[in-house]
Amino acid sequence: MTQNIDGDLIRRLRTEASLSQEDLAGLAGISARTLQRLEAESSGSASSLRAVAAALDVNIHNISTRPAGHQVGMRLGFAGITVGVLGALVGIAAGIGSDSLSAGEAGAYIGIVSAFAGLSCALLGWASNAYPSR
């Protein structure tokens, strides 16, 4: 399975470690040509990516990239949470303005809305890492 890779980052990490392509390829147990493809084409097999990440002593997620669709989904998710929180806050403010909510009740509702938004963002972030789009 082909993985999207940040080829420029691999090149930068390699040069910062004062390694040639041949040196890093040897440490990773892959051919120099495979490493050249990883850096130039920014894609390669999952096993090659794991090997290079291990040789550079970095987390595999730091050198892999996510498809654009994943980023759009994350942005839409956070936008939905933001709109929901703003709507709830407007509703709470309207309740305070019409004297149907006390300050204590409004504070409690704001706390609940904020906790829900925080948990939603945490869940969205966790799910995006646990179940990356392919």
Image (cartoon, rainbow, N blue to C red):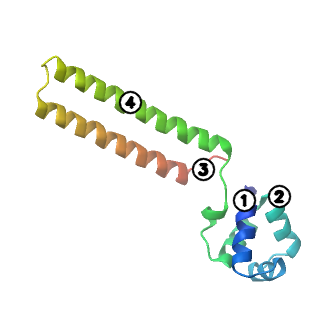
Under circle 1, the secondary element is loop
Q: Where is residue 124 in the image (x, y as percent from the top left)?
A: 47, 45
In space, the residues marked 2 and 3 are separated at their CA atoms by 21 Å
Q: Where is residue 66 in the image (x, y as percent from the top left)?
A: 65, 51
Q: In this view, does 48 lie above or below 73?
A: below
Residue type at mark 4 is Gly
Dot in front, 2 or 3 = 2
Q: In this view, does 53 lie above or below 112?
A: below
Under circle 3, the secondary element is loop
Looking at the image, tell me whether mark 2 or mark 3 is earlier in sequence order: 2
Asked if residue 56 lies left or right of residue 83, the reply is: right
**Labels 1 and 4 touching (C-beta < 8 A):** no
Residue type at mark 3 is Pro
CA neighbours of label 4 inside 10 A, class few (<14), some (14 to 19), many (20+):
some
Looking at the image, tell me whether mark 1 or mark 3 is earlier in sequence order: 1
Asked if residue 29 lies left or right of residue 127, the reply is: right
The part of the image, by quadrant, that contains residue 2 is bottom right
Look at mark 3 in the image and give the residue it sits on. Answer: 132
Looking at the image, tell me whether mark 1 or mark 4 is earlier in sequence order: 1
Look at mark 4 in the image and give the residue it sits on. Answer: 84
